[in-house]
Amino acid sequence: MSSDREEHDMVCQRAVTLIVDLCLHNSTLLDRDTCQDFLLLLSSQTSDRKERESRAPTPLIDKPRRLTDAS
């Protein structure tokens, strides 16, 4: 099941990359307004994700200690 999800994610990533490339190179295959909307949506989602990740709690896992440590 995990490999199906990874394959799906890879296909989606390739599709997004293709659309971004076409938009950035002003391809006649895509409408200019659609490209602007797509790039704006993509950049806002990236910003939202980064903001959520920065607010995520830090895991409470101690650094591993050596058996010879006195503490």
Image (cartoon, rainbow, N blue to C red):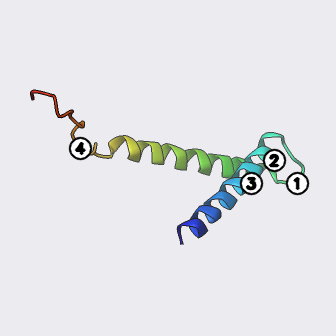
Query: Which residue is depicted at the point 60% across and 51% down?
Result: 41
Spatial CA span between label 1 and label 3:
11 Å
Residue bearing mark 1: 29
Spatial CA span between label 3 and label 4:
46 Å
Q: Taking 25 as reference, is 41 above or below it?
A: below
Determine which of the numbered discs, if any, sits on residue 22 in the image: 2
Q: Position of residue 18 (x, y in %)?
A: 77, 51
Identify the mark nearer the N-term, 3 or 2.
2
Whether the residues at callouts 4 and 1 have beta carbons within 8 Å, the answer is no
Identify the mark nearer the N-term, 3 or 4.
3
Q: Amino acid at mark 4?
A: Ile
Whether the residues at callouts 3 and 2 have beta carbons within 8 Å, the answer is no
Q: Amino acid at mark 2?
A: Leu
Whether the residues at callouts 1 and 2 have beta carbons within 8 Å, the answer is yes
Query: Which residue is depicted at the point 72% across and 54% down?
Result: 14
What is the residue that sits farthest to the right in this orientation? 28
Residue bearing mark 3: 34
